[in-house]
Amino acid sequence: MKIMQVDQLLKTETHYFKPYVRYVLSDFELDQIIVSANRTQVHWSSFNSYERRWGGTDLNGKKVCLYRHNAWGDQLMASSVPRYLKALYPDVKIHLYCHPDVLPLWLGNPFVEHSAIPLPIPFDAMKEYDYHIFYEGMLEGNSEPDQRCCYDDMFSFIGLNDVPARFKVPYVEVRPEDYKFFNETIGVVHTPYAVYHAAPANMNRAYPFHLGVKFVRMLANRIPVVVVGRDKKKEYAYLFDGFKNVRNLINKTKSFRDLMPIVENASAVVCPDSSVMHLTACFPQVPMVSLWGLFAPNDRSKYYTNDHPIFLKDACPHAPCHDHNFFLPTEQCKDAIGAPKDKTKIKSCAVLSAITPEMIMNKVEAFL
């Protein structure tokens, strides 16, 4: 983490930085500012000498700052930490700072004073905390073959190595107003339905669309299907249109909170390694089938009691490759079973492509 100040008012896509006011921000954010604001004088230094790491002392009556920058799935995983700290120390006050885009996820959360605080963090405010817990780069930067589950890493980072498994799951607070979109699209009184997440934010983790469409059509013969997801370029949303018993809600949800009641009331959820997978873990009564490729189930969903993963590791000698990039590691992908040797023709992860719609259907049938 870094301390930064600028010599003039600086506006980024989501933040305002006042001149000569010191802020605490991640190395990644600082790099972005230095590159993009080339006409602004940026002064920075390390926050290391100010950081107060918690050493296991009693937190009752203390103030703790928790930082987790962005991404819905990462925010959901991070939600396990304040929940457990509050269980240990009911009188601790925890403030979580995050990107404004993901702020709605924390609305009503009782473990972070019922909401998060948007970045950037003023340096003077940061100095008022008794302890700092910074999860900068931890989840998106771990690509080691022997990495542990993200939950084990997050807790061990603050010295907690004997956390009960029931606390290594996400937490959200579903509010009455979250049901507005649900009631408008699915209805207060509804028949059982399944949810299919067409794609995560990182498309490399997406189940191939031609196979996803085939699976949805199969599933719709058994139970109504609600398809969710984001298609910013509008390249694939239409593929799920026009099928009987299929409600295509891709690009229809206005916020992530719209998904909460949809998932909470589902009879089953099928999803890749995605934010919807972590959201489903908040509702252990909802069975899900997760589909894996670049990562393994033990990396992220090890403690999700309602998860029934499909991971065909043998489809690629490099699986799981733990690649966080938004482009496939094609130099490795070409070694997968049946992969084209011409790297330019590799369009999806071979481990995900090896999963057939029939395999998924067999898993889901056990729940219906």
Image: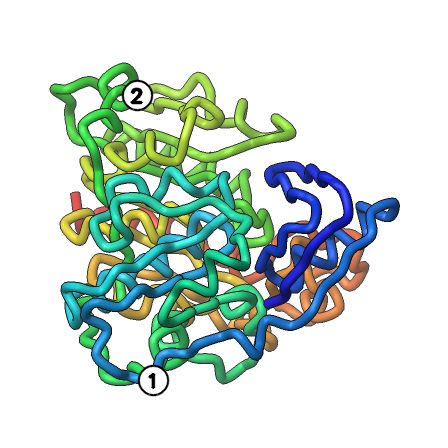
Q: Residue at x 40, y 21 (%)?
A: 243
Give the SS element for disc 1: loop
Q: Is residue 338 visible?
A: no
In the visual, does 1 lie left or right of 213? right
Q: Is residue 229 visible?
A: yes
Q: Which of 327 and 194 is in front in this view?
A: 327
Taking 209 as reference, is 130 above or below it?
below
Q: Which residue is drawn at 46% across and 39% down?
A: 198
Residue beneath disc 1: 55
In the visual, does 334 lie left or right of 247? right
Q: Find out whether the residues at labels 1 and 2 contact each other: C-beta distance under 8 Å.
A: no
Disc 2 crowd, CA 10 A, few/some/many (<14, 14-19, 20+): some
Q: Dividing the picture into quarters, in which one does residue 300 lie? A: bottom left
Disc 1 crowd, CA 10 A, few/some/many (<14, 14-19, 20+): few
Q: Residue 202: image x %, image y %?
A: 57, 49
Q: Residue at x 44, y 51 (%)?
A: 274
In the visual, does 15 lie left or right of 341? left
Looking at the rendered structure, the kind of residue marked 2 is Phe
Q: Residue 112 carries which label?
A: none
Looking at the rendered structure, the kind of residue marked 1 is Gly
Q: Which of marks 1 and 2 is nearer the N terminus?
A: 1
Q: Which of 65 and 247 is in front in this view?
A: 65
- Residue at the far right in the pictured view: 39
Residue beneath disc 2: 181
Q: Dividing the picture into quarters, in which one does residue 151 lie? A: bottom left
